[in-house]
Amino acid sequence: MTAAIEATRLTKRFGAVTAVDSVDLRVEAGELFGLLGPNGAGKTTLVRMLTGLLRITSGEARIAGIDVAANPDAVRRLLGVVPQALTSDQDLTAYENMDIYARYFGVDRPTRRARIEELLTRTGLWERRKYLVKTFSGGMRRRLEIARGLIHKPRVLFLDEPTIGLDPQSRLVIWEFLRDLRKGDSLTISLTTHYLEEAEALCDRVAIVDAGRIVALGTPAELKGKVSGSDTLTIGLPAPAPDDCMIRLRAFAGVHDVAATPGGLTLRADGGAELLPRVLGELARSEVAVRSASVDHVTLEDVFLHFTGRSLREGNTEHGAAPGRRVS
Amino acid sequence: MGKIWAVWERDLLRMLRNPMTLLTAVLLPLVYLLILGNSLQGPLTGLPLGVVSQDQGPETRRLLGALQAVEHGPGTLKLVAVDNVDVGMQRLREGALSGLLVVPPHFSSDAERGISAAPGLFVDNVDAIAANAVEASVQAALTSIHEPLARYETHLGPARLRPEEIYPRIDYDASLIPGVVVMSIFMATMIAGAFNTVMDRFLGVHEAYLSTPLRRIHINLGVLLSGTTVTCVTSSIVMTVGMLATGVRIHGGWEAYGLVAAVVVLTALGMLAMTMALLGRASHPRIVGSVNGFLNIILFFPSGALYPIQSFPPWLRAFARINPEMHAVAALKAVLFRGGDLAAARGHVLFLLGFTAVMLLVSTVTMKRTL
C-alpha cells in the first residue's frame, strides 16, 4: 500500500550546516504521526521539504506516492499545511481568509460555502466569521488556521507546532479538535511538536528528531519500552536507608537501579506498581520509616534523555535552522 | 483565472483596509503639484538691488527711472539706496542685497559724449538664477535709456519673430500634471506589488500561500493586478484634481480617454512589474522602501516632467529614451495638451506596452516560489 508520507535519505544543507541528515520515514494513511524534538532539531525543515516549501538537497520525498520535487503542484493539492507562524491575514475576516484560501485550491463556490460553515462551526468560530482576524486571540487564530488547512479536504495535514504559545485551555481545545478530525475521513496528520505530553496524548507513532536525524521511532509505548526501567519509584525517607537494605532492594527482580537522594530513594524498575508493596515491606523489615511513596511511569522525556543523553528542555539547539549572518 | 482573482482580492482587501497608506499615494503627488507648480514657475520678484550713485546727471536719472519702472512694474528688483561702495559690498556679502549697482562719476557726461559709459554691477552669484535675473533687469534698464539713440539709425532694425502657439496656452502648473500623475503611479507602486510580497515574507505569512497549488504566474499577476487597480484609482484622483485645479481638459473624445487610460494602466502595471522583478526577492520591506525612493528620483527627474529632455547631456538623454516614466509623461502630455491630436502619443504607448510585457515576463520568471 502506498504510504501517505515517505522520505528516503532526505537531506537538507544550508551551506556547511546539515539541517536534516539522511532521514528515512514512512507514515501510513490515516496515521497521526508525531515529530518530536527540541527547537532547532530540524523538524520544521523536514516538514518544509515534505511540503515542497524548501528545495531538497538530496534524497527523495513522496506524498501519496507522488514525488515532491518532480511534481510539487500535484503534491500541494493533497496537502493541508498549518505553519508554525500565524499566517492568517489579520486585515481579512475569518470567512474571507477561508474563502480566499479555498479559491487557491480551486474549490467551487457552493462547496466553499458549505465547507467553510462546517469547519468554522467545528472550530467554534462560525459566530465570529465576519470579524477581522486582528481581533482574534492566539488560540482562535490557530483554530482558524487549522480549519483553513482543511478547507480543500486534504489527504495529509501537516501541523507545525499547532499549540505553541497557547494557554492550556486553548491547547486542550485543539487536541479535542484533532482527535475529532480522526473520526471522519482517513486523514493522515503529521504533527510537529516539542511538547512531550502533546505527542504522547495524540500520536499513534512518534519520531524523535535530534540534530537533523531521527534517533528513535515507534508508538509512545514502544519508545517507552526501549528505556530500561520503565517506571520510577520515589520513596521519601526521614533518614538515609542502611547499606544492606539498599543491596537487598537492588537484588529485587525488575529493579534496574537504586539511588539515594537527599530526601530518600529513587528506584528505576519495571512494573513499578506491583513492586511498590515489596519495596515498602523490605524497608519495614529494615526498620526504615517511610514518609511518602510514589510511582511514575516513564515519559517521552525519559525516552528523549535515553536516546540523546540530554533532556528535551536542555536540548534546544539551532541545528535545523537556516544559518544566519553572524553579527559579533 | 480564479486563482489570480483570489490573490488579487486578498491583496486588494488588505490595502483597502489600510486607507491611510492609500491616502498618502493621493495626497503626496497633489502636494508635489502645489509645491512644484508654485516654486518653479513664478517670476522672481523683490530682489534687493543696492544703488550707489556717484553721478547726478540726466543719464543717471534716466537709468534710475528705468530701474524704478522695473521695481514698480514687474517688481523683479527692489531698489535700495546705498551711501558708498564699501557699505554696499558688505551688505552684498551679508546677503542683504542680491546685487550692487555702482554708477560712476561722469556717467552722464560720458554717455552724452558717446564714450562708453559702464556702471559697475556686483552680484551675489551664490544663487545663479537670482544673479541672472538681477543682471538681466539692469541690462534691460541700461538698454532702455540708450533706445533714443537708435532713432537716428538709418536701418530698420533687426528682424523680429512673431511666434504663434499652435495649441492652447499651457501654464507651468498645468504642464506638471503628466509628471504628477506619473509620480502618483510610482508612489502607489511603493505601497503595493513588491512591497506587499516582501512584507508577507518578512511576516512569514507567505508560507501559507506558498504551500497551496498557486503557481508563480497566479501569485505575480494577482499581486500586480491588485496594485494596478489601486494605482489606477489613486492616479485618476490625482489627475482629476489636477485638471480641475488648472482647467486642463481632455480633447479628442473617447479615443483620447482610452489612450489616457491605456497610459495609466500600462505605466502602473509596468512599474509594478519592474519593482517586483528588482525587489520581489528582498527579505526586508526596508530594502523595498529605500530602493524605491532611489528609483523614484532617477526615473522622475529625467522623465521630462519638470524640464525638457533636450536640455540633458547625451548620456542622460540615452537613459531617458528607455525610461518608462519619460514615455508615460510624453504620452500624457501629447493627449492632454495637443488638443485631440493623438498621433504623438502612439509611439510612447507602444513603448509602454513592450516595457510592461517584458517586465511581466521577467518578474514572473524570477519570482521565488519556495521559502
Image: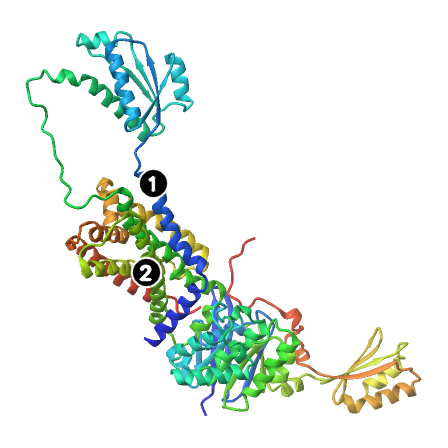
Q: Are marks 1 and 2 on the same chain?
A: yes
Question: How far apart are labels 1 and 2 at the CA level?
Answer: 26 Å
Quadrant of the rendering where the C terminus of chain B is positioned: bottom left
Residue at the limit of the structure toward the front, as seen here? B72
Q: Position of residue A255 (x, y in %)?
A: 77, 86
Q: Given the image, what chain letter belongs to the residue carrying mark 1?
A: B
SS class, disc 1 = helix
Q: Given the image, what chain letter belongs to the residue carrying mark 2?
A: B
Is A142 displayed left or right of B183 in the figure?
right
Is B14 displayed left or right of B333 in the figure?
right
Which of the two marks, 1 or 2, is nearer to us in this view?
1
Quarter of the image where one finds residue A112: bottom left
Q: What residue is shown at x 81% (from left), y 84% (from top)? A: A250
Is B308 displayed left or right of A139 in the figure?
left
Task: Write down the residue under mark 2.
Answer: B232
Task: Write down the residue under mark 1.
Answer: B38
Q: Amino acid at mark 1?
A: Asn
Is residue A153 visible to the viewer in this orientation of the structure? no
Q: Position of residue A4 (x, y in %)?
A: 47, 86
Quarter of the image where one finds residue A224: bottom right
Q: Position of residue A8 (x, y in %)?
A: 47, 80
Q: Do the numbered discs 1 and 2 sit on residues whose CB atoms are within 8 Å?
A: no
Residue count near mark 2 (Cα–Cα under 10 Å), binned few <14, some 14–19, many ≥20: many
Residue at the limit of the structure toward the right, as seen here? A287
Q: Position of residue B187 (x, y in %)?
A: 37, 54
**Mark closer to the chain start, 1 or 2:** 1
SS class, disc 2 = helix
Quarter of the image where one finds residue B112: top left
